[in-house]
Amino acid sequence: MTHYDVIVVGARCAGAPAAMLLARAGYRVLMVERAAFPRDTLSTLYIHQPGVAALARWGVLPEVVGTGAPALDNVRFTHGDIRLDGCSWAAEGQRAAYAPRRHLLDPILARAAVAAGVEFRENCPVSDLVFEDDRVVGVRLGAGGQGAVERAALVVGADGMRSTVAAKAGVPAVVEDPTLTCAYYSYWSGLEPGFRLFETPGHWVGTVPTNDGATLVAGYLPQDQFHSVRGDALNALLANVEKTAPELREEMAGGARLERVHGTGDQRNYFRQATGPGWVLIGDAGHHKDSITARGITDGFYQAQLLADCIGDGLHEPGRLAAALEAFAAQRLEALEPEYRATLKTARLAPPAHHLDLLRTIAGNAELTDRYFSTLSGVCPIDEFVTPELLDLMEETEMKGLTA
């Protein structure tokens, strides 16, 4: 007998919403998490407008806003003499982004899951999967591998880039690219408010306002510098800011650093096989890319909603469930691969000349600037950004440059 309908492994930005949505659909759901909340995790914090729309749809946005995280309804992007000021289009009426600290956001999502009827066990690692006839039918709990076995019709791996579910199921990558950047960040007080991005060849810096007047300052460098950077991360971060955004470095000198430096050189780029008999992967467990475009939380929300929508009321009909999981896999890849490729281009930290020409063309046009930021948020599909009108404008700008 199956004890649960679904077991979700991982209770953060993909697992908790998936558990919540499946419980709201009437399923009996167990959610297990190896950590104990509240607890921080490496994160850029930023939730793009489609992610904010999901929070609103789920009824969770008021509690997120209630943390005091400021509404981020303007983006400033600077590359040399090019400056873009604007904002993404709204997603389902939500124009602002938010960037709450993870020790605040993740418990909110977990509480929403529990309120929907999910059984939640913290400090509860999964040591293995349980198989019958090559099908996953449950999990073994406990770090030593001697814990209780819980069974379910479906096991959802939402346990991050180093997923135990993926490892134990022997899940291969179907798309994989080399790591491109290493990233380090900390939090400062006393900075100008606003979501700001700065780029020069080989360098990238971002500021993300979050709770309690703090601003996350993140710096990205090429992956081949990781071993030299990691030994002196603070000075590497400060030097990166000085090179990329000297005006920001002056602000930081007048403010105060609030925490130690956090960072990683392990920013893998992949899509793993999404599903197999009795299991499915969501969030970073199934798909991860460089954090330079801050897509992780928003993509986790998207996958949670997509999985619940695909399963619908068909969990206990094997044919329907198999078809639902295959549909999830296909739609996940179709939706997320274009932004994956765009992220890899950004993470190479070497924007081509034609991209800089594009930025110069749109810099003085508020409508095109907002359209550009809408591709970064995911509101405007990337393949819909370049229009005949934009190409004509770029040609006109180029001709003016030649005749100047």
Image (cartoon, helix red, strand yellow):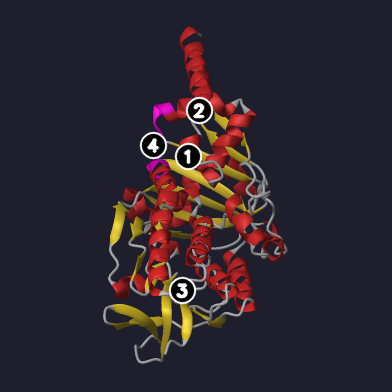
Three-letter residue code for mark 3: Leu
Q: What residue sits right under mark 2 in the picture?
A: 387
Q: Crowding near pointer 2: few (<14 within 10 Å), some, many (20+)?
A: few
Q: Which residue is mark 3?
A: 315
- Expressed as whole percent of the image width and height from the top left, the position of residue 251 reads 63, 45
Whether residue 145 sits left or right of residue 245 in the image: it is left
Sequence-earlier tag: 4 or 1: 4
Whether residues under marks 1 and 3 lie with C-beta atoms below 8 angstroms apart, the answer is: no
Q: Residue 317's spot in the image, x, y percent?
A: 43, 75
Horizontal relation, residue 402 to residue 27: left or right = left
Is 279 or 210 nearer to us in this picture? 279
Q: Is residue 241 visible?
A: yes
| Disc 4 and disc 2 in contact, CB within 8 angstroms | no
- Badge nearest the viewer, 1 or 3: 3
Three-letter code, disc 4 = Ala
| Amino acid type of the residue tagged 1 in the rendering | Ile
Residue tagged by mark 4? 350
Q: Which residues are magenta?
A: 345-354
Looking at the image, tell me whether mark 1 or mark 3 is earlier in sequence order.
3
Residue 104 image-quadrant placement = bottom right
